[in-house]
Image (cartoon, helix red, strand yellow):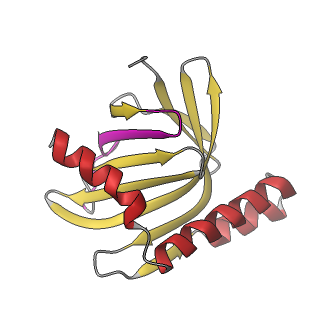
Amino acid sequence: MEQIRLFRKRYFPDEIVELKDDIILSCAENLIITKWDVLKPRADISRGYSAYFIDKGVKVSKVYRDEELVYWYCDIVDLEVKEKDYIFTDLLVDVLVYPDGHVEVLDLDEFADVSEQNVIGKEVCLKILRRTNALLQCIYSGKFSEMTQYIDRAENENG
């Protein structure tokens, strides 16, 4: 596998962070699977696995506290590739899916703020809304496992 580097770009705070400790388990044209520990120690979560669905603009993470599944955390993202650097921009809106099936949409206020302040343009706003809607439709229609199966398979293969 060609060695790539992953980065997370955020609006709040305005930063780009290399995910240098993430372990890339697989890398294909439209899917990257990683295993990771939290960047900074936290009481609520400790580790997880992520699947970057490049063509869908969604990163799905299976998040654990020790051995307990806390939730599936879904980021709406965009990708910029610079040679071997993959820069994933967090597009603010997040969707959590809990083990009991409860769904929460987060950070719509931050999305509204950056839209209002013209930090992001109309095209990006529309992209965020469409990607969020597609993800929610996938979840509500019972097809979310079509995304999570990639992580489950990687987790079983890599422990």
Vertically, is 88 above or below 113?
above
Image point 27% across, 63% down: which residue? 44
Vertically, is 159 above or below 28?
below
Q: Position of residue 77 (x, y in %)?
A: 59, 50
Image point 66% across, 65% down: which residue? 110
Q: Position of residue 16 (x, y in %)?
A: 57, 35
Q: Quadrant of the N terminus?
A: top left
Q: Does 123 sit left or right of 34 as displayed? A: right
Image point 39% across, 27% down: which residue? 20
Q: Position of residue 70 (x, y in %)?
A: 27, 67
The magenta span reads: 28-43
The residue closer to the viewer here, 65 or 143, is 143
Count of residue discs: 0
Q: Quadrant of the C terminus?
A: top left
Image point 66% across, 71% down: which residue? 109
Q: Position of residue 40 (x, y in %)?
A: 33, 44
Vertically, is 39 above or below 28?
below
| Res 121 visible | no
User: In terms of image quadrants, where is residue 81?
Assistant: top right
The residue closer to the viewer here, 65 or 30, is 30
Q: Is residue 77 magenta?
A: no
Q: Is residue 42 magenta?
A: yes
| Res 103 visible | yes
